[in-house]
Amino acid sequence: MNIVECRGLKKIYRQGRMDVPALDGVDLDIVRGDFLALAGPSGSGKTTLLNLMGGLDHASAGDVILDGQNLDALNQSELAELRLRRVGFVFQAYNLIPVLTALENVEFILLLQGLPAGERREKARAILDDVGLEGLYGRRPAELSGGQQQRVAVARAIVSEPAIVLADEPTANLDSQTGQGLLELMLEMNEKKGVTFIFSTHDRMVMDYAKRLVLLRDGKIAEDRKKAE
């Protein structure tokens, strides 16, 4: 079953008097439980495609159907609710709230969803344990390493058990050993909990871990290959 369907996606940015195409007619189906990397040179459209899939930006033409809903048919409130309930985001810059502890950062998404305090705390502690941060609940982002901050970001993305996690260059600010540990963690979440992951990346290691690799060039899909099990 498809979790994402992209149909004829186009995205054009206006720069001065020029129209600059970022995506040019992309068709892509992503099945539930996939572990997929979007790769390609800078300017190929991979981050734009990721943002359109997550409802963070609007297509100039075409449709994105996420978990059965056409994003173009939703108003801003409905789109925000869909992102809150069904999509987890992992950003290159972590985007943690600096004044909150690791536990509070992970709890925050559950607070927005209206979960009771006790249930929030229990879920947040359990997912931080899963990502190897047991005992670091009370540390704020500035007191954590880059790899630990990214693990908090992953924990926050998956604590509400979203349908899909979108990760933009998740290993870009990490050394290779820390990046590998993070990928192993996400692969385990994918295989044990069925979480769908989509990465945009320049990192060869991410491409190697991916079960499916979609290469973009000049806003078009140049190659789409599923790796042998």
Image: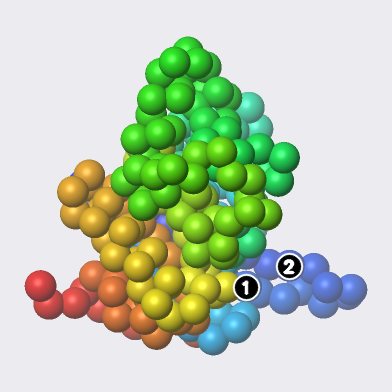
Say which residue appears at 39% left-offset and 44% top-offset: 134
Say which residue appears at 57% left-offset and 33% top-offset: 104
Circle 1: element type: strand
Q: Which mark is residue 22?
A: 1
Asked whether the beta carbons under mark 1 and mark 2 sit within 8 Å of each other, the answer is: yes
Check the image and tell me how it is coloured.
Answer: rainbow
Above or below residue 211? Residue 2 is above
Dividing the picture into quadrants, the one containing residue 73 is: top right
Dividing the picture into quadrants, the one containing residue 224 is: bottom left
**C-alpha distance separating marks 1 and 2:** 7 Å
Say which residue appears at 55% left-offset and 23% top-offset: 111
* 132 with respect to 219 (left or right): left
Kind of residue indicated by mark 2: Tyr
Above or below residue 77? Residue 103 is below
Q: Which mark is residue 13?
A: 2
Which residue is at the front of the view, 29 or 38? 38
Which residue is at the front of the view, 218 or 226? 226
- Where's the C terminus, which quadrant? bottom left
* 3 with respect to 114 (left or right): left
Which residue is at the front of the view, 212 or 195? 195
Outermost residue on the left side: it is 229
